[in-house]
Amino acid sequence: MTDSSNAAVPQQPYQPHPYLGGRAVALRALAAWRAGGAGGAGGAGVARTVLVTGGSGSGRSRLLAGFLMLCEPSRRGEFELSVLDPATVPPGELPAPPVFDATGLSAVQLRWLVADHFSPGAVRAEELDGRLAGIGSVGEPVAVVVADTDRAGVLPQLGEPARVAEEVLRPLALAAGVRLLADVDRADADRLAAVLPAGDLLVIDLDREPWRDEEGLRLQAELSLQQPDGAAQLARTADGPLVVRLAAWSARSAPDGPVPLPRTVGDALDLQAERHGVTELTLRRLLAPLALAGPGEPLPLELWAPLASAVAGKDLGPALAGGQHLLLPFFDLVTAEGRPPAVRIVHPALGAELRARLGSTVHEVQRRLATALLATLSEKDGGDGDGPGRWAAAAPYVREQVVGHALEGGLLPGLLADPGFLLHAEQVRLRAAVEQLAAAGAELPPLARTWLRLAPLFTRQEPGPELRAALLEHAARQDGLPAPEFGLRLPWRTLWARPLAGVRAVTAAVRPTGGAVLVAYRPGAEPELAAYDALTGEPDGTDPALLVRPTDEERSATPLGLSTGGDYLRLWTREADGRTGAQAALFLSAEPLGGADLTPDGLLLLADARGVAALRPTVLTAPADPIAPVGPAAPAAAPAG
């Protein structure tokens, strides 16, 4: 007799990762990278840098997310680890690696983010290379994960993902103390592979063997299709998970038809149009507003029909209303409390396919989309729609998305002459777009040049519209421009501004005959003391020895108090008993301040790298007083371009 206790017991197959439904080969390589040991699949055990790549829609972001779930101690409890392949599970004793999401960030922002995490204290961009190179050590390397690099940048088509690969991923991969994991598109993976040591690099291309996971695609298709008989064939045909998803939703949109078997995202579009008896052109026009939208706000449902109609040049409202089943595979409905229903394209790969199909007409389509968004602005100031209040009343989607459409559609230079647009358009996108125009040699309107030199301050400090308007008003006066009209009550009005180099301190003084004077101290200059009438900005010829500075008692009796920092100052009201009251104004400077003071009647005198100026705080005037600037702006140095 045979002793059954000694018979070989067949091993039960491991269960797939519940979030991924497969990708076991790739997960083994990633787990070996995290362990940092030898013997991992595909050489991952010795590779310090692992790049996950593949076509858009191949599932690289999802693979990274599923792997990071197993790395996070607080989430590992969600998994029944005993049924998973042990080689796909990273060591439990290791902490979760830091993850830096590149979505919407510039390469410079991402460099700062990584440097500040591992080596805080940098104050200049030139320091970042050294700090990135010095992360970790050979004996104690640190793991760094950079996710969604293909979604870097606030506007598409500006090449930010390639800059992230060159300026962030490359120095991290070359740092001896770093073990890097990143997902990148194939072009950037190829460029990095050409410059990184082959023995330190593993490229996991999810579209190619051994990383392509047909079994996982089959499981996805079986779970998604209402006709499971076609799942195996779809898995063999489809390029990746996104195509399987589109095919499954296409099958649901017309359940009586055969299972669609697309190979690419483009095939999925064509088969769906054929399935519902419409032309591919109609489907393309309906989806164009979603496909060409930049990152950020999903498209409000109420705008879909007007924008699609603008693209087509005819009313597509009926086609949209009757096309729910046609469009079903290609958009997601987005709902949030307190917000109207909105829609977004299901995946950037679909947007890229639709954009490619527009070909040379994409610029005209973008122009039409921008024009349609501009047409939604509320009509203000007498109903002509051109007043300063129209941008304040614009929907958030319009303020965010019109920038990208106008840039590619050729309308942005005209919009830059509108103070309301400069003030209310989303500032990060606007900065990226205007810098692109400037780099291409476009002639910017004068106020746009002024705005551009303040753009780093606006995007870094994120001041609200009123403060942005006040700072732009002051900067315009510095640049010799008339004060813009923003339709807002500003915290101050700039009375005058004059160029003056080398100012290290300013003080208020009073002439013997009365009247306040700004006195600027310029060490080593000729003359060291320069004086200007505080109200008009005209040079003052009074002998400096005869000017009298306010006493401490007189200062304590002024209507406002002042506190200063290196690049900011605050004005405070005074209570009846002389104590500090509420904040009356905040001033932010794009460069270090050279000094600030208050005259006895409350005028603010200040200096920066561009010169000296006097501001009248709004709190000193009646609400109905428009506080018109006194006299024309003094001649100023040429504005920064």
Image (spheres, rainbow, N blue to C red):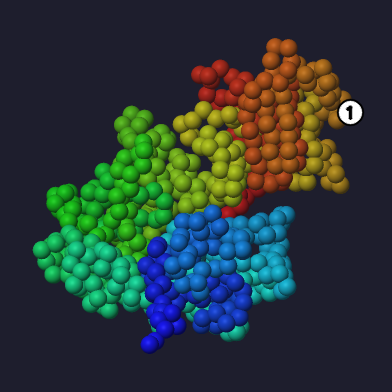
Quadrant where the image shows the N terminus: bottom left
Q: Amino acid at mark 1?
A: Ala
> x, y (%) of residue 317?
17, 49
Q: Is residue 5 left or right of residue 333?
A: right
Residue closest to the far bottom: 1
Q: Quadrant of residue 508?
A: top right
Q: Residue at x 60, y 44 (%)?
A: 461
Q: Residue at x 26, y 59 (%)?
A: 330
Position of residue 329 relative to residue 307, above or below, is below
Locate residue 63, reporting x and y percent.
44, 67
Q: Looking at the rendering, which quadrant does residue 205 occupy? A: bottom left
In the rendered view, would you say 14 is above or below 381?
below
Q: Is residue 167 visible?
A: no
Name the foreground residue: 544 vs 295: 295
Figure check: 165 above or below 545: below
Front-lying residue, 97 or 385:
97
Residue positioned most to the top = 576
Q: How many marks?
A: 1
Residue 179, visible in the rendered structure = yes
Q: Secondary structure at mark 1?
A: helix
Residue pushed farthest right?
Answer: 545
Label 1 packing within 10 angstroms: few (<14), some (14-19), many (20+): few
**Residue 304: x percent and y percent?**
26, 49
Q: Is residue 235 above or below residue 127?
A: below
Frontmost residue, 350 versus 18: 18
Q: Which residue is mark 1?
A: 545
Residue 195 in the figure: left or right of residue 434: right
| Picture quarter with the C terminus | bottom right
Query: Residue drawn 27% across and 64% down?
Result: 223
Residue 357 image position (x, y, % from top left): 28, 69
Give the residue at x 54% y 59%: 72
In this view of the protein, which residue sits in the foreground, 6 or 549? 6
